[in-house]
Amino acid sequence: MSRLYKDGFDKECIKEHKEEVYGIAYTQNILSGRWKYIILWYLKTKERRYSEIKAFLWDIPQGSLTKQLRELERDGLINRKVYPEVPPRVDYSLTSKGKEFIPIINLMEEFGKKFGEQFGEQVD
């Protein structure tokens, strides 16, 4: 738990709510990254090629997309399948762990729909 303490959590809070704090921090850590939530959302219905993901997220730099895909793969949320073709074809899909995260993505979507317009209306 030392990492959580170093990241700013109160030491007494960690002792009292160790499992809850760890669960939140773990989820936050594996999903830190601007595009990870959208990548998971985009993969929720079917396997996608790298080029499809890049076209969907047209303004993401290639290096950032590659980094976030690698991190999602490393953390067990997506599968990466490389086909031995020239040029190489790479497909991405959700793992069972990634599929278990989809209800959270859906809740985020609903929350944004409910409160996003209110936020937008307040911005001048």
Image (spheres, grey):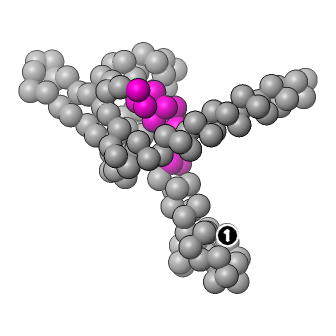
Report the residue marked by disc 1.
8
Helix, strand or loop for disc 1: loop
Q: Where is residue 36 in the image (x, y as percent from the top left)?
A: 49, 38
Q: Which of 3 and 25 is in front in this view?
A: 25
User: Quick check: 13 left or right of 22?
Assistant: right
User: Quick check: 73 left or right of 59?
Assistant: left
> Residue shown at 56%/54% (left/top)?
28
Which amino acid type is marked by label 1? Gly
Visible residue check, residue 47: yes
Q: Which of 103 and 79 is in front in this view?
A: 103
Q: In the picture, residue 44 is in which quadrant?
A: top left
The magenta stretch spans residue 33? yes
> Residue shown at 32%/43% (left/top)?
95
Q: In the picture, residue 93 is in which quadrant?
A: top left
> Residue shown at 55%/69% (left/top)?
22
Q: Give the range drawn in magenta.
A: 31-45
